[in-house]
Image (cartoon, grey):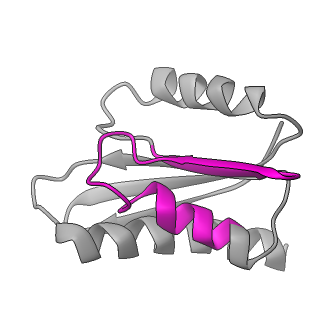
Amino acid sequence: MQLLNTYTLEVKKSKFVAYFYQIDKKEEVKGIWELLKKEHKKAKHIPYAYFIQNEAGKSDDKEPSNTAGTPLYHLLETNHLKNHAIFVVRYFGGIKLGTGGLIRSYANSAKMALNQEKSS
């Protein structure tokens, strides 16, 4: 596994910290998730998506269904990013964002991490 980039987005006092990784096997996903969980003890959610050759997966990590993992997965899929994973650490800021707000926030933070990697 190799961390390619990170990006932090703040939306209504919630912080979304995106991590964009290059990975070689599915087992690395669990390891990265556990590492981020240890590093960000106060984070409420760490959803993710990955795409490895012909295998893909996603997790909303207790966010409402399809508001976190799905937008991350679509980002990997539409950019044809095989052997990559995106994790987004969320610190809840006390203001509910609603379904649309969550989808946009997760997608935008991940998109910025991806775009910064493309431009470097």
For residue 27, above or below residue 85: above
**Is 118 inside the magenta-drawn segment?**
no
Q: Residue at x 49, y 62 (%)?
A: 70
Can residue 87 be seen by looking at this rendering? Answer: no
- Locate residue 105, reporting x and y percent: 38, 70
> Which quarter of the figure has residue 110?
bottom right
For residue 26, above or below residue 94: above
For residue 28, above or below residue 60: above
- Locate residue 111, reporting x and y percent: 59, 73
- Locate residue 81, reporting x and y percent: 81, 65
**Residues rendered magenta in the picture:** 47-76
Q: Residue at x 33, y 36 (%)?
A: 43
Q: What is the residue that sits farthest to the left in this orientation? A: 95
Q: Quadrant of the C terminus?
A: bottom right
In the displayed structure image, the side of residue 110 where residue 91 appears, left or right? left
For residue 56, above or below residue 70: above
Can residue 53 be seen by looking at this rendering? Answer: yes
